[in-house]
Image (cartoon, grey):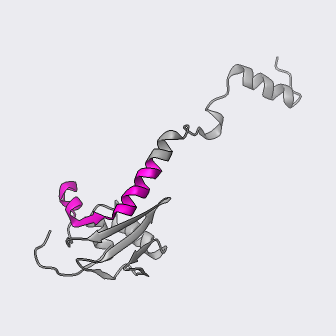
Amino acid sequence: MSDEPEPVRVDKWMWAARLVKTRALAVDAIKGGRVSINGQKVKPSRDVRVGDRLEFSNGPVQTALVIRAIASRRGPATEAALLYDETAESAQRRAEYVAQRRAAPPVQEGGGGRPTKRDRRRFDASRGRERD
């Protein structure tokens, strides 16, 4: 974190604040219209300043942050957490989403994996094939 409030590009700040894994992902999110600063859609080269309100959607959850410090270099997660404050509404929405995900039954892709011998026999019978 730097002491002087020198502005930093929004994509670089999001990467330094560990909101995204890479700057390329930050640029994709910004160009995709999922990031706004003070209520306005931005470009990746837009500078952020202390006190700006950054809103972005990461999947189904809309996150709202207030920028508290500027950093141009990625550091430890403990320092990254000091760069912003999440708003109370945003934290509430995120907590509700996490509770819904935990309450929902797990989704199995593709019917649960490899078919059993019984499943295979039913499949063959439905297609009119007999196994030897």
Residue in view at x 30 percent, y 66 percent = 15
Instruction: State left or right for residue 127 relative to residue 12.
Output: right
Is residue 87 depicted above or below 124 in this figure? Answer: below
Q: Nearer the viewer, residue 88 or 24?
A: 88
Range covered by the magenta-colored residues: 74-98
Picture coordinates of residue 126, whole percent (x, y): 85, 29
Which residue ends up furthest to the right in the rendered image?
128
Instruction: State left or right for residue 110 relative to residue 1.
Output: right
Quarter of the figure that contains the C terminus: top right
Instruction: State left or right for residue 105 relative to residue 8.
Output: right
Picture coordinates of residue 14, whole percent (x, y): 31, 68
Residue in view at x 41 percent, y 68 percent = 56
Quarter of the figure that contains the N terminus: bottom left
Picture coordinates of residue 118, whole percent (x, y): 73, 20
Which residue ends up furthest to the top in the rendered image?
132
Q: Is residue 81 magenta?
A: yes
Picture coordinates of residue 24, whole percent (x, y): 38, 68
Q: Is residue 106 magenta?
A: no
Which residue ends up furthest to the left in the rendered image?
3
Q: Nearer the viewer, residue 62 or 46?
A: 62
User: What's the magenta bit mostly, secondary-structure-wise?
Assistant: helix
Total numbered badges shown on the rendered structure? 0
Residue in view at x 39 percent, y 62 percent = 89
Is residue 40 depicted above or below 69 in this figure? Answer: below
Q: Nearer the viewer, residue 116 or 91?
A: 91
Q: In the rendered image, which quarter is residue 105 located in?
A: top right
Q: In the rendered image, which quarter is residue 52 located in?
A: bottom left
